[in-house]
Amino acid sequence: MTTSLSSPRLPAPPLYERIKGALREGILSGQYAPASLLPSEAAMCAQFGASRITVRQALADLQNEGLIFRRHGKGTFVSLPKAFQNVTALQGFAEAMSAHGHAIRNRVLRLGTVPAPTDVAQALQLAPGAPVAELHRVRLLDQSPVSFEVTWLPEALGNIVARADLATRDVFLVLEQDAGVALGHATLAIDAALADHATAAALDTGAGAPLLRVERLTHDAHGTPIDFERLYFRGDAFQYRLRLDRQVAAASQSILPLQDTV
Amino acid sequence: MTTSLSSPRLPAPPLYERIKGALREGILSGQYAPASLLPSEAAMCAQFGASRITVRQALADLQNEGLIFRRHGKGTFVSLPKAFQNVTALQGFAEAMSAHGHAIRNRVLRLGTVPAPTDVAQALQLAPGAPVAELHRVRLLDQSPVSFEVTWLPEALGNIVARADLATRDVFLVLEQDAGVALGHATLAIDAALADHATAAALDTGAGAPLLRVERLTHDAHGTPIDFERLYFRGDAFQYRLRLDRQVAAASQSILPLQDTV
């Protein structure tokens, strides 16, 4: 198919899309500041000559995108800018975020020994059902919950981590400083899911809220897997940022080296 | 706070959590294969001695996690494994995925010139309202919709891209091969959102489905921004994978080099 921009295929957007666009522009241009109250639905109906259903469709879309949020009985507000973590080296959350001037606290919800579930045993190269330490934490960024994290460690490392001050320290730092482990690399799988009941309660969000989900398997410097985690970040509060460089993908290389950008 | 694993703080999980755990184990161990039908709700109630409300709570959580999906009137099925893209170098979707043996097609929904919205103009370093090409595509992986992508290009590059076969070719390759642009680096911001009406329709999913959202700004080799995109991946169908290496974060380095892993 070939197309020319001189004959654009752009059907006129429906009214709710035009309302969305106008509100988005208002938010991005700063006309509506973060945390400020948007005009009422009635005022928008009058402004755009639209029905309440149409205005609500536009607002629902903007809410799904995370640009606005609603407080029952109080109205619709502009979302705050998201916190973000630059993903370059392997870092713990507190380590990465405190460099931005954020205050990090952790709330430990569970800590104990459990028989390793199938996927955890496989990741940590243990026999299914082998005892592993399981740690549930909520990470608070400037006192607001940002992520719910489930960590599994081989039992011996778990015993060392359990003695540490987990309210303030990253597990990575405890592994390095208290357990004397040299950390190597981690593999990450990143996708999106909806909050289940427990995660929604931990993150003070509704069930069905969007989550950035990260499965991270950290290895020591010898390549042995020692720390398996599932991290659930609030989609409306957090962002990963990274930089990629263009290079020719050689078919013979199954794992491409990361480009040195210096 | 210090805690020992010998006095674990593990409250007995509620019944719906135990049902979830049993079903998850069944799926991960292969007892329930991908795409297979799970036992009926009635059968699960009998098996676990649970009420229908409790079984449904467990199933709702597993569905939010993406492990199962429901077909109205047909029952509950185990999800297929997700497609994934290894994120190492900057690559287009077709380029990255065809290396895994996947067939990629693109459905062009819109292509035309629009006045640049505030955020697009800012990203591409253009005056607000300057003409830009706007391209809407659905990317099909093995004939199933996986991502909805909105691309903005400066008008001159847009005219070249509009003449290309966009059903099969990545914009990156068109920029390099047809427009003679040397691509440099891109910055990515990754988070999660819910599908709005248009995205849900494009991706053949329900409004409110979880999406992995990527905002990508690609620069040419001179560092000039030339391609701004928003990519929306179905949370139930796609995963980014990457590898990170541990290194000491020097406070004086504002941008850390990516570690060369070879």
Image: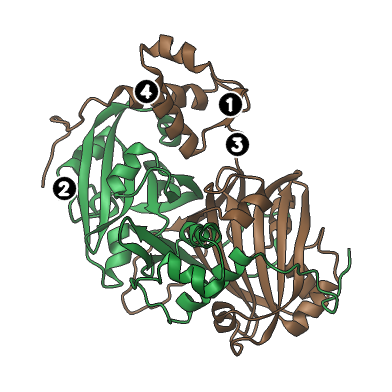
Chain colours: A brown, B green
Q: Which residue is mark 1?
A: A77
Q: Which residue is mark 3?
A: A81
The nearer-to-camera label among 1 and 2 is 1
Give the mark, 4 or 1, whose residue is nearer the N terminus: 4
In 3D space, how far apart are the residues under numbered discs 3 and 1 (Cα atoms)?
Answer: 13 Å
Q: Secondary structure at mark 2?
A: loop
Q: How busy is the neighbourhood of tag 4: few (under 14 within 10 Å), some, or many (20 plus)?
A: some
The nearer-to-camera label among 3 and 4 is 4
Give the mark, 3 or 4, whose residue is nearer the N terminus: 4
Q: Report whether A166 appears left or right of A244.
A: right
In 3D space, how far apart are the residues under numbered discs 1 and 2 (Cα atoms)?
Answer: 42 Å
Query: Marks 1 and 2: same chain?
Result: no
Q: Secondary structure at mark 1?
A: strand
Q: Amino acid at mark 4?
A: Thr
Q: Secondary structure at mark 3?
A: loop
The nearer-to-camera label among 4 and 1 is 4
x and y, in percent, of residue B145 in the image? 28, 55
Q: Amino acid at mark 2?
A: Ala
Residue in front for this viewpoint, A141 or A150: A150
Disc ID at residue B164: 2
Question: Are the residues at dot 3 and dot 1 in contact (C-beta closer than 8 Å)?
Answer: no
Q: Is residue A258 visible?
A: no
Q: Residue at x 59, y 64 (%)?
A: B16
Residue in front for this viewpoint, A8 or A154: A154
Q: Report whether B138 appears left or right of A132.
A: left
Please give the chain letter of the residue carrying mark 2.
B
Query: Marks 4 and 1: same chain?
Result: yes
Q: Which residue is mark 4?
A: A54
Q: Secondary structure at mark 4?
A: helix
Q: Amino acid at mark 3?
A: Pro
Q: Amino acid at mark 1?
A: Phe
